[in-house]
């Protein structure tokens, strides 16, 4: 019979201790406690998007569909009409929405580390996330001719859930669905502060050197040597460059 014995290092003579392996540094092995990622449900079904919840996400993200939105003194944009959102979603070629549990939204918004407690409606807590029992925290869509080209719009993630790769996941899902339809000419309409994000998703400068031009209605009261740019409810006039020929 083999007998296993345990010897405490502190009881060994000092001349033998140097032959023993050094004890591991426990402090270095302990990682800082981080909250687990929230459970997510990713949908590509436009019918799962509630227009009113989508409007709330626009408000929380301070995101506007208008190129030149009206901004108040606090820096907030005008809320978009829910009926227009319903129309836009129904006519989008690809719609990707991300949901999580309501309690996760509340806990993240209040910076609480405790997400799920003991007691209460535990069946609802342990049930998987669905569009019916979850809250919309991420969204993105693409408009396409379904044959050649497509453009990506309105990539949004609830501020409490940013920095976890959800936005990139939305973009990647949109691109995958477009490529599966043999659409490879994919553009993204983004602001200057969003360029770094889209670069991280694989977008770059157009090889043809093209740029986005927006239609700007003109007024007959201005001379022909002036160009008009519509900026929300304001009209800004400026003379064209000297080498402008078209």
Image (cartoon, grey):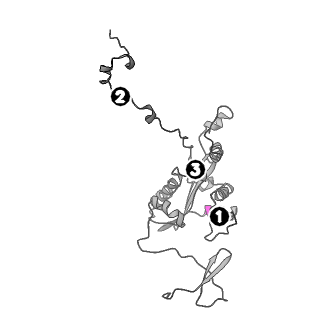
Task: Measure the alpha-carbon separation of dots 1 and 3.
Answer: 27 Å
Q: Which mark is residue 161?
A: 3
Which of the 4 image quadrants contains residue 142?
bottom right
Q: Nearer the viewer, mark 2 or mark 3?
A: 2
Task: Measure the alpha-carbon separation of dots 2 and 1.
Answer: 67 Å
**In-front residue for pair 14/214:** 14
Q: Nearer the viewer, mark 1 or mark 3?
A: 3
Q: Secondary structure at mark 1?
A: helix
Residue 85 lies in the magenta stretch: yes
Q: Earlier in the sequence, mark 2 or mark 3?
A: 2
Outermost residue, top direction? 1
Residue 174 lies in the magenta stretch: no
Q: Position of residue 239 (x, y in %)?
A: 57, 86
Q: Secondary structure at mark 2?
A: loop
Q: Nearer the viewer, mark 2 or mark 1?
A: 2
Judging by the rendered image, the residue that carries numbered circle 1 is 87
Q: Main secondary structure of the magenta part?
A: helix
Q: Which stretch is magenta?
A: 84-90
Q: Earlier in the sequence, mark 1 or mark 3?
A: 1
Q: Secondary structure at mark 3?
A: helix
Q: Residues within 10 Å of mark 2 (few under 14, many from 20)?
A: few
Which of the 4 image quadrants contains residue 7?
top left
Q: Position of residue 125 (x, y in %)?
A: 63, 37
Q: Residue drawn at (68%, 35%), measured in percent from left and top? A: 121
Q: Position of residue 112 (x, y in %)?
A: 63, 42
| Residue 143 showing in the rendered view | no
**In-front residue for pair 231/49:** 231
Quadrant location, the N terminus: top left
Q: Which mark is residue 22?
A: 2
């Amino acid at each position: 019979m083999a007998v296993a014995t345990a010897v405490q290092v502190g009881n060994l003579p000092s001349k033998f201790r140097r032959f023993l392996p050094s004890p591991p540094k426990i402090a270095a092995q302990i990682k800082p406690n981080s909250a687990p990622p929230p459970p997510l449900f990713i949908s590509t079904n436009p019918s799962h998007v509630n227009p009113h919840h989508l409007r709330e996400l626009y408000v929380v993200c301070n995101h506007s569909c208008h190129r030149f939105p009206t901004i108040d003194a606090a820096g907030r944009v005008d809320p978009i009409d829910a009926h227009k959102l319903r129309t836009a979603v129904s006519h989008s070629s690809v719609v990707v929405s991300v949901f999580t549990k309501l309690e996760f939204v509340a806990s993240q918004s209040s910076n609480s580390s405790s997400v799920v407690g003991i007691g209460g409606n535990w069946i609802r807590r342990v049930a998987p996330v669905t569009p019916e029992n979850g809250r919309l925290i991420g969204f993105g869509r693409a408009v396409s001719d379904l044959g050649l080209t497509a453009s990506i719009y309105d990539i949004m993630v609830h501020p409490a859930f940013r920095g976890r790769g959800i936005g990139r996941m939305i973009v990647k899902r949109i691109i995958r669905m477009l490529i599966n339809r043999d659409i490879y000419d994919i553009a993204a309409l983004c602001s200057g502060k969003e360029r770094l994000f889209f670069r991280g998703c694989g977008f770059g400068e157009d090889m043809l050197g093209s740029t986005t031009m927006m239609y700007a209605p003109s007024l007959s009261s201005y001379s022909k040597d002036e160009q008009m740019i519509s900026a929300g409810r304001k009209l800004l006039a400026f003379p064209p460059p000297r080498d402008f020929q078209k």
